Amino acid sequence: MKSTKYLFIIGFLSLALIASLYLVARTTIFRGRASGSSSSYVLENSYLFASPLQAKAGDTSIPTERREQIRLTVFLLDGRGLGVANQTVSLSLPKNISITNQQEITDSTGKAVFDITSSSVQTFYVTATVDDAKLPQKVRVVFY
C-alpha cells in the first residue's frame, strides 16, 4: 500500500517536471533577441538615459574628443520588452552641442548610443525621436 502511494507521488512529480520543462521551452523570451521587421517598437516601453548627467564644458582649444562627454543611450523596445533592431533614432539637441560618437541605428538589443560635448556652460533637456514620434521621457543634461 505504501509503495503504491510512493509510486503515485513519484509519477505525479515526474509528470509535473516534464510539463514545466515543456512550458519553459515554449517561452518566447528564450528565443532570438531583436528583429528588425517582424516586431514594432512601443514608445511607452522604450527609454532614454544619460550617463553622467553632468560634465564639464570644454574649452574650444581642447580637441572635441578630449572634452568631457555625456553618453546618451536609447533602448527601443517592443511590447514584450525585447529590443527592436534597425531603427533610426535622432535626438533633439541645442545647436552648439557636438556629437562626438554616434550609433543612431539600433543594434540587436534595440540600443542606440550618442556621445555629446559642449564648449559652453548650459542646461537643457534631451528628447529622442523615432519615425517622427517622440519617446515620452526626456533627460536633463548639464554642462558646467
Image (spheres, helix red, strand yellow):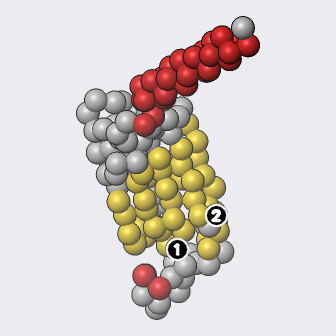
Give the residue drawn at x 53%, y 18%: 15
Nearer to me, 86 or 114: 86
Upstream in sequence: badge 1 or badge 2 = 2
Residue 27 picture quarter = top left
Q: Camera-side residue: 99 or 93? A: 99
| Image location of residue 76, percent across then percent down | 44, 42
Considering every residue shown, the one lying at the far right of the view is 2
Residue at 57% of width from left, 17% of height from top?
11
Tell me which amino acid carries mark 2: Leu
Residue 69, which numbered label?
1
Name the residue type under label 1.
Answer: Gln
Location of the N terminus (image quadrant): top right
Image coordinates of residue 110 in percent, x first then y, are 40, 46
Q: Which residue in the protein does label 2 denote?
A: 53
- 66, 60: nearer the viewer: 66
| Residue 129 in view in this figure | no
Residue 68: x %, y % from top left = 55, 79
